[in-house]
Image (cartoon, grey):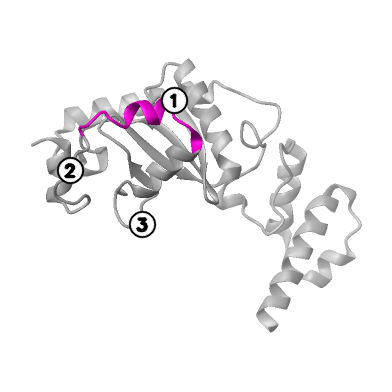
């Protein structure tokens, strides 16, 4: 069964929709941004809530917020330079309020789907391969935190209304974490005069005041 037939059987694309055609490949690679944006709007998604657009058998488009698209492109570029197997990025295009990154489409099942059917030896080999990828990525170091282009810190564990500043130094991250570990109340934090906690105290107190106002509305 071809990839088009498989998607038709699963209900992702309608019967008669031929994704094996290469008629759009030239548009995808070298066409005008406006034409590519129109193609993205008309092509099927990989699931109703998915941000992945199936453009053809060769290419797909992934939806990113405008602030994170450049960081993603640079991260993939560095990963390829380090020898890590990641899809090749072809281009990016603005479509409505989001940015779509066009990349090679890798055929086959996802690891999530096949994991339970793999033998112990295959899972062990995959675990070693993933470990090597992580160690390779960790070989790239920086004097400041944050993403590669914008410097933003995107982490569930560091999420805050005002967040960390772009490209924070170690002292900024330490102050941020220390504030929340030692936090007891807004009143107690406002009494503190320790300059080393100035950044975390001011921003996090504003955050707590914001939450208080929202909860009282």
The residue to which callout 1 is attached is 30
Q: Does residue 31 show up magenta in the picture?
A: yes
Q: Distance between the residues labelled 1 and 2?
A: 41 Å
Q: Which of marks 3 and 2 is in front?
A: 3
Viewer can see residue 184: no
| Residue 171 shows in the view | yes
Query: Which corner quadrant of the image does residue 119 belong to?
Result: top left
Rendered position, 181 above or below 55: below
Q: Reply above or below: 98 against 106.
A: below
In the image: residue 61, left or right of residue 3: right
1 and 2 marks in contact (CB < 8 Å): no
N-term mark: 1 or 3: 1
Rendered residue at 46%/24% (across/down)? 135
Report the residue at 67% width, 35% height from top. 145
Pointer 3 or 2: first along the chain = 3
Q: What element carries label 1?
A: helix
Q: Residue furthest left?
A: 1
- Which residue matches tag 3? 49
C-alpha separation, residue under disc 1 versus residue under disc 3: 28 Å
Q: What stretch is highlighted in magenta?
A: 20-33
Q: Picture coordinates of residue 33 (x, y %)?
A: 50, 36
Proximity of marks 3 and 2: CB atoms separated by less than 8 Å: no
Residue positioned 61% across, 43% down in the render: 67
Whether residue 131 is situated above or below residue 186 in the rendered picture: above
The mark lying in front, picked from 1 and 2, is: 1
Q: What is the CA distance from the residue labelled 3 to the residue labelled 2?
A: 25 Å
What quarter of the picture does the C terminus occupy? bottom right
Q: Residue 116 carries which label?
A: 2
């Amino acid at each position: 069964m071809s990839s088009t037939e498989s998607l038709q059987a699963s209900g992702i694309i309608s019967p008669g929709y031929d994704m094996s055609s290469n008629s759009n490949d030239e548009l995808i690679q070298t066409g005008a941004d406006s034409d590519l944006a129109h193609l993205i709007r008309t092509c099927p998604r990989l699931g109703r809530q998915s941000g992945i657009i199936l453009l053809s058998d060769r290419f797909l488009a992934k939806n990113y917020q405008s602030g994170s698209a450049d960081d993603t492109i640079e991260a993939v570029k560095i990963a390829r330079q380090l020898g890590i197997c990641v899809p090749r990025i072809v281009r990016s295009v603005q479509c409505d309020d989001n940015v779509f990154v066009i990349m090679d489409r890798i055929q086959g099942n996802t690891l999530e789907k096949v994991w339970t059917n793999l033998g112990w030896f295959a899972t062990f080999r995959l675990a070693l391969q993933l470990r090597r990828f992580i160690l390779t990525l960790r070989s790239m170091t920086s004097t400041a935190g944050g993403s590669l282009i914008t410097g933003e810190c995107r982490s569930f564990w560091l999420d805050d209304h005002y967040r960390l500043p772009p490209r924070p130094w170690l002292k900024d991250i330490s102050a941020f974490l220390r504030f929340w570990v030692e936090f007891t109340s807004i009143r107690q934090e406002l009494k503190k005069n320790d300059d080393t906690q100035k950044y975390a105290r001011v921003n996090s107190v504003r955050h707590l005041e914001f939450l208080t106002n929202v909860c009282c509305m």
